Amino acid sequence: MAHYAFLDNNNIVTEVIVGIDETKTIEGLDTETWYANFKNQICKRTSYNSRIRGTYAGIGYTYNADEDIFVTPNPYPSWIRSGSFWNAPTPYPQDNKMYLWDEENLEWQELLS
């Protein structure tokens, strides 16, 4: 069993389905091509174990064709993409406290209990 993501014209994932194994063909076509023709949308295989295309695609993710990876939505304008994921411009504190990102001040703010 394999999973497939369908993309809109901006390479945004609109749907993810479970389909037949990627090593099989349907009516002589590879699975990505057959599903793309069937749904009239671009189709790209994705996997839970992230062995292909960076990370498992989710609705709202972007497919980056140049890198052949799915990219998670950007949580904040200041964050920097690294592969499929986004990182804050400053690392998360490693002091066993909980923090939330403060985009206005570009820093981690401690959650007080």
Image: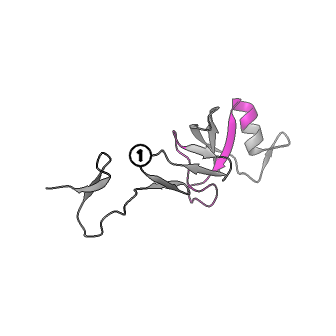
Whether 46 is among the magenta residues is yes
Instruction: Spot the residue most to the bottom.
Output: 95
What secondary structure characterizes most of the magenta part? Answer: loop
Residue at 52 percent of width and 44 percent of height: 58
Determine which residue is flagged by label 1: 75
**Which of the pair 24/88 is nearer the observer?**
88
**Which of the pair 19/8 is nearer the observer?**
8
Q: What amino acid is at disc 1?
A: Pro
Report which quarter residue 90 is drawn in: bottom left
Q: Position of residue 110 (x, y in %)?
A: 21, 57
For the magenta stretch, what is the residue range?
Answer: 36-61
Whether 60 is among the magenta residues is yes
Q: Secondary structure at mark 1?
A: loop
Q: Position of residue 75 (x, y in %)?
A: 41, 46
Q: Report whether 64 appears left or right of 95.
A: right
**In this rendering, is residue 56 above or below 6?**
below
Residue at 32 percent of width and 47 percent of height: 103
Report which quarter residue 7 is drawn in: top right
Instruction: Spot the residue most to the right.
Output: 28
